[in-house]
Amino acid sequence: MDRTAQRAPRPPGRTVAYDPSSSAPPLHTRAAAVLEAGWTGASTVPSRSLYPHQWSWDSAFIAIGLRHLSPLRAQTELETLLAAQWADGRIPHIVFNPSVPLDAYFPSPDFWRSSTAGRAAGAPRGVETSGIVQPPVHALAAWLVHLADPGLSRARGFLTRAYPRLAAWHDYLLHRRDLGGGGLVSVVHPWEQGMDNSPCWDRPLSRVTPAPARSFRRADLDHGAPEDRPTDLDYGRYVRLAADYRDGGYADGAGDFAVEDPAFNALLIASEYALDRIARELGVARPDRAERLTATLVERLWDPAAGMFLCRDVRAGEPIPERGVSGLVPLLLPALPRDLAATLVRTVCGPHFGLGGATRLVPSYDLLGEAFDPHRYWRGPAWFNTNWLLERGLRLHGERGRADALRKGMLHTAGASGFAEYVDPYTAQACGVTGFGWTAALTLDLLHDRPARGRNGLTALKEGDRA
């Protein structure tokens, strides 16, 4: 059935997020206050209530915004995360704060048992972490943080200390996680990709027997509305996958879930460009892998009929026929073929994602998809980090007008929603928690990175100029 002609009208009964009055503090001041409230002295929590520890890709995005307030704090943010790296090169997706009660977040340190279950993989003994990873935005963040104050960065040896850890991180992904044998990285848990309950995972997750509901307690429902969060069934499958991975000593390749994801791999490629710049800054020779990886991404995950990239189920050996925002993120790559970039722009602005028409921000999932839900986590709401990446991608590929409109929409929505974790893509109604770390941080980055400059951190990687 052709669902293209069946786009649902804007849902009734939802009000557009209010506009703060002109007497409200400036957006910059409000965003800075969010980051100040989340600062622990060594890193920034995404949310004091819902996410009270340090998250991997959150810290990368937060550092990108923090560089405009305090380059030193932005460097410290990344250094704290990198200090928890495992000996095999992986950067864990959570670094736990020992002063936070165990029942404040699940899965807690006593579930992951990193220092014991992860011993063979080289988990650190001095800090508890999770055993899975998150998207590799870190080298990109490190390069942009360096550019914010190169003198301070060089005086502190920031890149000198970060580079070996970042290089080991990329090597881990490219050597240990090429589970499909085609040159791309696979994720072994939906939490690794960061878009936890995307419909793109429904098919591979259906093979996973969920953990019994009585075997765990969801702390997220203490702070978030159930209709905004993953279902209990999904959560049971997440717990089963994580427990099996832990019980296998965090060895890669044996689990039921292995997916090549376009956004995860695109962010690795963007960070490969950044790592090349860091190596040149330090006078270090390293292989040029970014353009080769871009070609591999196109070869394995591009779907001409869908007009975008699709995830690939490694265990089933086939693409996953769902349109998630992940499949648009490769727009940020400088070496993406021009015709593919143009097709992605048409898809972003077409009926499946509606940018500039039905939606002000790009939703996390296909507006026409059977599983679309405008409020439930990654099954439809718009997120600020993916929209920040797409704004950069649009600008990189010459779509300045669309990029300007998306930037304006993000700034308005961030302020009007109280820096929400995510929003209804139709109405901009806040979902999840407010005062969310990366929403505030990326708002700061948009405010400082003026479109009139005609470039941004991603074009700096391509052209070699200063961000």
Image (tube, rainbow, N blue to C red):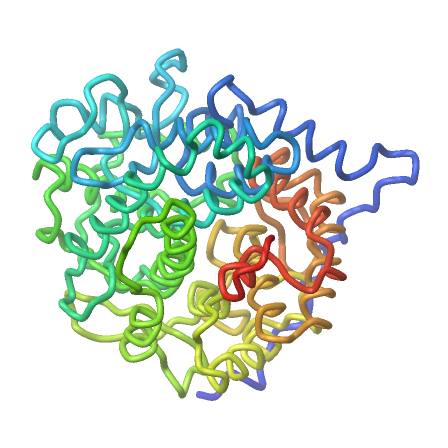
Q: Residue furthest right?
A: 23
Query: With respect to residue 269, does 138 lie above or below?
Result: above
On the image, the x and y values in percent for residue 61 come to 51, 43
Where residue 238 sits in the image (x, y, percent)? 27, 44
Q: At 53% from the left edge and 24% from the top edge, which residue is drawn?
A: 48
Whether residue 281 is visible, yes or no, is yes
Rendered residue at 18%/71% (across/down): 182
Residue 464 vs residue 380, the one in the foreground: 464
Number of numbered discs visible in the structure rendering: 0
Q: Is residue 222 visible?
A: no
Q: Pick whichever, 312 or 375, lies toward us.
A: 312
Q: Is residue 82 left or right of residue 21?
A: left
Q: Is residue 82 left or right of residue 66?
A: left
Which residue reaches farthest front?
A: 283
Q: Name the spot of residue 145 as percent of width and height, x first.
A: 53, 40
Residue 135 at what x, y percent from top left?
37, 50
On screen, residue 36 versus residue 294, left or right, reads right
Q: Is residue 397 above or below residue 70?
A: below
Q: Is residue 257 above or below residue 90?
A: below
Residue 455, picture quadrant: bottom right
The quadrant the N terminus occupies is: bottom left
Is 141 above or below relative to 323? above
The residue closer to the viewer here, 67 or 212, is: 67
Question: At 26% from the left edge and 69% from the top edge, which residue is drawn?
Answer: 312
Q: Nearer the viewer, residue 19 or 53?
A: 53
Q: Is residue 406 left or right of residue 242?
A: right
User: Which quadrant holds residue 408?
Assistant: bottom right
Report the residue at 52% width, 25% height from top.
49
